[in-house]
Image (spheres, helix red, strand yellow):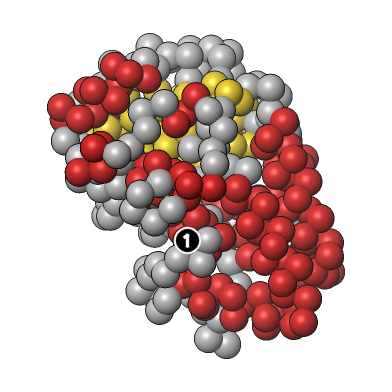
């Protein structure tokens, strides 16, 4: 979807697009509570944080080959890039492009809740280096829509509230933006994936959705406990600086980044018999090696 096509929609068109995508997420027959459960047929393409990298997004979409109905792609951390336009963050456009993709391929495009989307929707401060991202993003809405910016802002809140926390495969892989920290396990609701999210789940530091999208430095024994409770063999997450694009943080956690020049993705048959995170790391694909760009 070209930027001109997005801009042509106007505030109401963008808001309606985001709202329709939210309805698709909530109506996905594979979703139970806050987790989407995939079967054992087809292929899954997993990305790391994208942070409004438009070239990498194009490559990911091309590589996902979604015209094949059994192909799926997992996306997260879509907004808040380091590139500003007239001092504003315009990454609402990435949300619109993804929403259009969701509408074109319902049930195949899975967007997971991440801390930057949560922060934006719930007006919580967050920074990735360019400044305070929630304010910069809001400035982008004002720059693009003027007095109608609130219409899009409210639709973004609906969109974010519709996002699941995780995508799980039949083979035992669980994709999520992050996992709760060791400290958060004292208050984290281990049953959060099996139920619909409520407003308290998004509360800073205390909510289970907040903890699952902001957590860092997980410990092997903690991962083993979560894996046993959720029937998982290996977790795939982002929310960590991975200069090489991919890294195994022990046997049960694979970390992916997809936003920088060494960004990577992981493509797997859904029938793949998973062993450990180190094995998965060897299958990662540099985004730079994938064909496609904004100029194509």
Q: Residue at x 69, y 22 (%)?
A: 29
Q: Residue at x 38, y 70 (%)?
A: 127
Of the 4 image quadrants, the one containing the N terminus is bottom right
Q: How many marks can you see?
A: 1
* Left or right of 246, for residue 220: left
Q: Is 21 placed above or below 139 here?
A: above
- Say which residue label 1 marks: 119
Q: Residue furthest bottom?
A: 86
**Near-viewer residue (181 or 200):** 200
Camera sees residue 288 = no
Q: Residue at x 60, y 48 (%)?
A: 161
The x and y percentages for residue 224 are 22, 23
The x and y percentages for residue 226 are 29, 25
* Left or right of 142, for residue 73: left
Camera sees residue 209 = yes
**Near-viewer residue (168 or 150):** 150
The x and y percentages for residue 160 are 59, 51
In the figure, residue 95 lies in which quadrant? Answer: bottom right
In the figure, residue 21 lies in which quadrant? Answer: top right
The x and y percentages for residue 291 are 55, 47
Of the 4 image quadrants, the one containing the C terminus is bottom right
Q: Residue at x 35, y 74 (%)?
A: 129
């Amino acid at each position: 979807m070209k930027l001109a096509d997005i801009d042509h929609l106007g505030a109401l068109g963008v808001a309606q697009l985001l709202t329709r995508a939210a309805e698709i997420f909530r109506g996905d027959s594979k979703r139970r509570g806050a987790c989407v459960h995939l079967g054992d047929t087809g292929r899954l393409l997993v990305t790391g944080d994208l942070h409004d990298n438009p070239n990498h997004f194009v490559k990911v979409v091309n590589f996902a080959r979604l015209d094949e109905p059994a192909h799926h792609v997992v996306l997260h951390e879509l907004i808040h890039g380091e590139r500003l336009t007239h001092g504003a963050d315009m990454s609402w456009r990435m949300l619109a492009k993804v929403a259009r993709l969701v509408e074109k391929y319902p049930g195949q495009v899975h967007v997971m809740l991440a801390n930057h989307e949560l922060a934006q929707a719930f007006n919580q401060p967050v920074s990735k280096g360019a400044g305070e991202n929630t304010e910069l993003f809001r400035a982008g809405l004002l720059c693009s829509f003027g007095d109608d910016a609130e219409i899009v802002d409210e639709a973004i809140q609906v969109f974010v509230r519709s996002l699941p926390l995780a995508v799980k495969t039949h083979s035992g892989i669980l994709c999520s933006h992050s996992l709760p920290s060791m400290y958060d396990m004292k208050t984290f609701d281990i049953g959060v994936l099996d139920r619909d999210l409520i407003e308290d789940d998004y509360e800073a530091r205390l909510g289970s959705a907040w903890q699952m999208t902001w957590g860092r430095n997980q410990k092997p024994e903690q991962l083993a406990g979560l894996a046993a409770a959720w029937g998982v063999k290996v977790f795939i997450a982002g929310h960590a600086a991975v200069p090489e694009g991919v890294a195994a943080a022990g046997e049960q956690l694979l970390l992916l980044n997809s936003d920088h020049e060494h960004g990577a993705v992981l493509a797997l048959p859904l029938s793949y018999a998973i062993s450990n995170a180190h094995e998965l790391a060897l299958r990662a694909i540099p985004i730079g090696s994938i064909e496609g760009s904004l100029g194509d």
